[in-house]
Amino acid sequence: ENKPYEDLMTDAKTEASALDAQHDVDESLYSRQLYVYGKEAQRKMQKTNVLLVGLRGLGVEIAKNIILSGVKSVGILDADPVLIEDVGSQFYLKESDVGRKRADTALPKLAELNKYVNVHLVPVVSGCLAPYLDESVLTKYNLVVLTGKTIMEQVHVNKLCRKLGIKFISADVHGLLGSVFVDLIELTVKDPDGEREKRGLVGSITNGAKALVTTLDDAKHDLQTGDHVTFTEVKGMEQLNNIKPLPIKWKKRNQFEVDIDTSKFPKYSRDGYFQQVKMPKTFNFEDLETQLKNPKLQFFDGMEMECHCLRNGLSLFEEKNGRLPDPTSNADAKAVVEAAVSFGKQMRVGQGSSDSDKKAVELSEEAQEKLRKLARPAKAQITPMCATIGGFVGQEIIKACTAKFSPLSQFLYFNAQQALPDKIDTIPSSKFAAKKSRYDDYIAVFGSDIQEQVMNINMFLIGSGAIGCEMLKNWAMMGLSTGKKGRITITDMDTIEKSNLSRQFLFRPKDIGSMKAKVATKAAKDMNPAMEIKTDAIRVGKDTENVYDDAFWESLDGACTALDNVKARLYVDQRCVEFGKPMVDSGTLGTKGNTQVVVPFLTEPYSEGAKDQPEEGIPVCTLKSFPHKIEHTIQWARDKFEGWFSNGPQEAKNFIERPDYLSELAQDQNSQIGNLQMLNELLVNNKPSNFDDCVKWARLRYEELYHNDIVQLLTVYPEGKTDNKGVPFWSGTKRQPEARNFDATSPEDFDFILAAANLYASVFGISKCTDEKVISKALSSVVVPKFVPDKDAKIAVDDEEIEQDEKKQQEEGGIEQKISNLTNSLPDPNGLKSSLKVCPLKFEKDDPTNFHIDFVTACSNLRAINYRIKPESKHQTKFIAGKIIPAIATTTAMVTGLVCLEWYKIVQKAELERYRNSYANLALPFVTASEPFFPLKKEVKLQGEKKGETLAFSSWDKIEIKIGDESMKEFLRYWYRVYGYKVSSLSYGSTSLYMAARKKEKSMKALLKKPMSEVAQERSQAALPKTKYLKLSIVCDNHEAPEDAPDDDKSIDFPPVRFYYK
């Protein structure tokens, strides 16, 4: 039998109490990443000691990511002195640190990132590092991460780690080649992909040797072959309830097959749920020495095996010469490739068990040429690559700590060869020579000319949250906007909260409450004082175009978005298209990240590409009477919060403070009665004088919601009711509820009273109370009226019926009398001004003391129990109710690295095939990149003077007209004469200037005689722009369209028009 839902609630409470009893996870700090990892994984992370060897650019990126994430300790081992080129990628170094020990210099800054993490130096003793680590050092750590070491050194340490049972990761950045190797010996994970387990309603289950399951209403089940499911609440085939998880086979989007014989089971009736259950998965690893000759490679771009050979060729070159290749030496690059070719011939790649089944790797001439170009700048570590690989490695370390998500198996090679300068062999080698500058590594990769262009970029950064912080750090290292012509304009209206600190690494606890953009700017300038940054706290949008005007956009070289919503992205994209400016967008969602590069005339704009899916609404009838998911009850509880503690009190405040409130309300008949009823409830019927009154109010609301409303619903639709086809009313998505009787000793019931009473008290300025005895005493004195259901009542079963009921009520008589009665019963607002201060509450999910999430959780879970829906924890309720976007430092770092690589291509004015849009899911792990789409093109066959020509245009194109500030009539004549089409409508922004259908009207005739600038100013009632042109939109009649053609085919759109009136 199914477990009672009251017991499920108790189990959830017990589990939560057991977890919280340890008090070892700072939820306010880690809140956003807890929605990715969960508390159990966070606790495992907080018990993990990591040894990190090497603190150049890649090492500091890895250290930053895992310290922010909250491991127990990070030991840093690096005794090498700071070189000038280190300052260009190790963001905690300055030019004045050259000659000092790298680790000593950076350690204090790393320790500031997270007070819970023990960041310490590992002393270098004899035999400890060069060339090998010592066992006495290794045994203090659970995981060892090597950077900047040769393959020979890596093999040696890997063997020691395996001997001691210690997990091992090695990683490196060589110019535009990144490499990662993972050996976790053996790892069993419970959650391989990080996705929420799928759950859905069952429509039917067949009887047979294997059961075919079809979802209710043919809903998509989102399962894959090999997934496991179990069943609950099945009627008819009760034998399926709570069986052990069974593997499924995908059949259709709405069907899957389960390997169980149901031929002798009763027929399926109704009500069942399928529930995905994730099964543990064990990953086994081979040691590095074995993997070198027959590697398991994570796919990226098809060059993985060639890059494997190159990485080993670089190591062989370094071991032989004691250095990496000189970026000005073609001979060095060729020597590396020769070593790579030799290494490939020694490999034995294949699936078989014997050497005869395996073969060597032969590198083609084309492959060797690509590897030569990658080998030349291999000594360099540039921040875009360090951020990309550092983000990936950080996530692999967390997997090793937590056994959460699928680890890399076992090599990743990431190359960004498309960012190399075009025709690089024609560039003099002196352009890549070191200048004893912090930018020497960038010069080694891209050359001094490109570096100078980067330094003189005029950039607009919108947002300074997690992505914005990482971007500023990257740009500080790259030297972006440090030249005479360079400037970054950054804007962000947000202030810093504690939950930001676990991923927005430029902020510290002392910065909480300060403006993000201001603090981020200061931190970036500390990293590179030469940066020129203008800081704003202004929203980017239509209402601020007086600040970010045409002249501002014209002056830019590009824009970079660090935003969390589509609307703002679309606006920035629209401005970039209008002014022909490149934009690179990026976003993250937990372990998932993506980037999109937008280049004028080459790629599609953001608005034409894939956009975030619109949020699905919940039908009103589902919320009111027929919930069947926890999301429904949570949204219902949020609506109660807004109505009781926010919107209602705001109306009461307006009534008291605004003399014209009632007359204004009378103008809005749709909300008039509802608001008047709300005012009477708050100011007449339920105005509290003390906390006991608040408890009484909460108790009566409980009775109304969880008992009376349910009894009324079951009176209208009793158990056993069927439709005209004999189908039970309470089936499918309609779950038959059960009324709940209040029990003051029940934790669920008491939690509701506690939260609701305290919130109601806050609204009326009454002191809060959490004393259980005081509240219980107040409860004991509450008299609850006996409820008698209305047998003639009607309750809508869908949104259409709700609309019909509302319309019927409006048509019925007596509305005016009802309004009059409600208005007359209200107190004199003047008498309330001195005696009552109403304080509307604004929902705030991140304050654990304000009862907001406590109320939503209690309110939602009680309704869930009514409807036999599994209750949810406060943590998960906060996630759903607060619409929280899960975020982690690792993904953020990686996407910003990918973004910065695209800016190097933009600076070079690269061809389309060199750009990359990227997508990563670090949980799998999966990283891919694809060429952007070209912009959509439209064509118009022109007439008039241009007859015979075809105008092909995309979103990027514009038509410029320079005929002086002629009258609108002359403008229309000019257009017809040149393009051969009559204008049906002419607009200036959102203002209509001309409509052909109204050309005979007196007012339109008058406008036609006036100059275009005067028409625009008169019609828009606004001053003309500072630019010399008006931005016009033109739609023309399609005289070739047949009469019965659709309306869209009867008109022709042209590109935007710039009409120069000056």
Image (cartoon, rainbow, N blue to C red):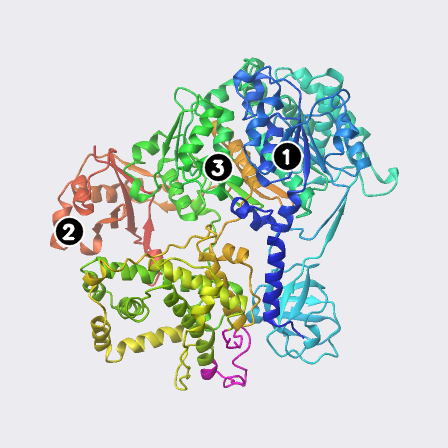
Q: Is residue 727 magenta?
A: yes
Could you tell me which secondary element the residue under label 3 belongs to? helix
Is 844 displayed left or right of 298 in the figure? Answer: left
- Closer-to-camera residue (996/367): 367
Q: Earlier in the sequence, mark 2 or mark 1?
A: 1
Do callouts 2 and 1 mark residues in contact (Cβ within 8 Å)? no
Which amino acid type is shown beneath numbered disc 1?
Phe
Task: Establish if 462 lies above or below 327.
Answer: below
Name the residue tied to disc 2.
Answer: 1004
Which amino acid type is shown beneath numbered disc 3?
Pro
Name the residue tied to disc 1.
Answer: 414
Q: Is residue 34 magenta?
A: no
Q: Earlier in the sequence, mark 3 or mark 2?
A: 3
The image position of residue 314, as x and y in percent, is 71, 24
**Number of numbered labels in the structure image:** 3
Q: Is residue 820 in view?
A: yes
Could you tell me which secondary element the residue under label 1 belongs to? strand
Task: Establish if 652 lies above or below 742.
Answer: above
Could you tell me which secondary element the residue under label 2 belongs to? helix
Name the residue tied to disc 3.
Answer: 509
Is 730 displayed left or right of 802 in the figure? Answer: right
Task: Establish if 389 lies above or below 451.
Answer: below
- Closer-to-camera residue (52/1053): 52
Give the mark toward the camera: 3 or 2: 3
The image position of residue 90, as x and y in percent, is 57, 25
Label 2 – label 1 distance at C-alpha: 63 Å
Question: Residue 651's quadrant in the figure?
Answer: bottom left
Q: Which region of the structure is painted magenta?
A: 714-742
